[in-house]
Amino acid sequence: MNRSAIDLWVGVFVVTGIAALLFLALKVGNLATFSSGQAYQVFAKFANIGGLKARAPIKSAGVVVGRVASIRFDNESYEAIVEMNLDAQYQFPRDTTAKILTSGILGEQYVGLEAGGDGVMLKSGDRLRLTQSAVVLENLISQFLFSKASEAKDTGKEPAKEPAK
Amino acid sequence: MIVPREKIVQQLRERLERLGSRVTSIVWRLGFASRFLYYLVMHSGTALRRFRLTVAEVYFAGVLSLVIILVSGLFVGMVLALQGYETLQRFGASESLGVLVALSLVRELGPVVAGLLFASRAGSAITAEIGLMKATEQLSAMEMMAVDPVARVVAPRFWGGVISMPLLAALFSAMGIFGGYLVGVQLIGVDAGAFWSQMQAAVDLRNDIMNGVIKSVVFGIAVTWIAVFEGYDAPPTAEGVSRATTRTVVTSSLAILALDFVLTALMFTGGNTK
């Protein structure tokens, strides 16, 4: 095989190899869908974040508008501080509510934003005042049991757990 | 039966000596191979300046491995889609087929299987070629003409392999995802939009794709290093060359699997719990 044919084939090989890498990066990975270049950061404090993880989606009306950048523990208020990167093309009022929700019953957790009515929009570095923590299954069950127990106490069918007042 | 005490001590001593000499020779070989790699990298000037030498080796190691890499990638992706669908569909999650195929290929199967194929297709050829050159005293002849055989023969093959391997792994993964798409979407009928969008949502550029590329680069260096070293170190006989070729395939396959475990442990345990 002569030289130019080898060069040609190697050229084809390198180009297809790089094309495969680009395919993986653009079509398979999520490079193109969300770039952190045009994003602004807002913070929110939660009493309990449940299973929220960094890079979890932030959705408003079901549309992904950003991603969780980092999660820290605040040693003064004993709450979790969630830093969120929101896409710059989506603006939210200052009194937006942030909730930690779960997609499906066993799905991953995400931050849901519910827009408020304020005329002033959120800026980079702002903090969301209105938050709602993740629902922890154990708390839910214990609340349910307590309400059942107090129901029983009211109707007097079953002996109450605590001594009667 | 009573064995004299001296005899037992003697036997024990011989066994220990054998073990010791084996360990010493392994360490010695490892050190020799490391010094060989250092010398090789230091004398790569010719291979990189006269780049045509390396290009010819990219042709032998990379272009000629294309067929086996592309065909195996396609079939691995197709089988992954078939098997994955069986399991996912039981949990009503058949839309996640794209995620399963893409993550398995990009993180693990792409670099590892491409590396194993590369070791048996190109690594063995490199060892046999260099070993035969040594057996037929071509390397000595070069030295007589004041041409450094490491710089002229070994280094271009090393760099050719190191360049080819990441490209082959990327092609393998891309082809596998295409195969998964063919079976999952075209044959079984998973929704094409869900296939691609769930894949794009789950595969991360840095965590998954870059780590896969890093793996393939490491495997490329390991396989080609083993191949050129075994060839250069082979006893200059027909038997020696054939043994060295076998050893290349065995050692580099084991090296790939062991390195894969180490790299996976480093990459995917720290990153995911964050």
Image (tube, rainbow, N blue to C red):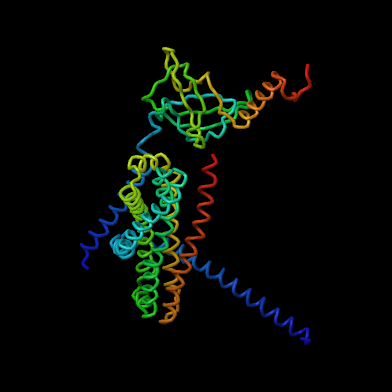
Q: As drawn, is B132 to the left or to the right of A78?
A: left
What is the tally of numbered marks visible in this picture? 0
Place of residue B34 in the rendered image (x, y in percent of width and height, measured from the top left)? 50, 64
Q: Residue at x 35, y 71 (%)?
A: B147
Place of residue B194 in the rendered image (x, y in percent of width and height, measured from the top left)? 36, 40
Place of residue B200 in the rendered image (x, y in percent of width and height, measured from the top left)? 38, 41
Q: Which quadrant holds the N terminus of chain B?
A: bottom right
Q: Residue at x 61, y 75 (%)?
A: B21
Question: Can I make out residue A78 in this image?
Answer: yes
From the viewer's side, name the closer residue of A35 and A98. Answer: A98
From the viewer's side, name the closer residue of B184 and B269. Answer: B184
Residue B4 is drawn in which quadrant? bottom right
Whether residue A28 is situated above or below residue A90 in the rendered picture = below
Q: Which quadrant holds the C terminus of chain B?
A: top right
Place of residue B73 in the rendered image (x, y in percent of width and height, measured from the top left)? 36, 57
Whether residue A139 is situated above or below residue B235 in the rendered picture = above
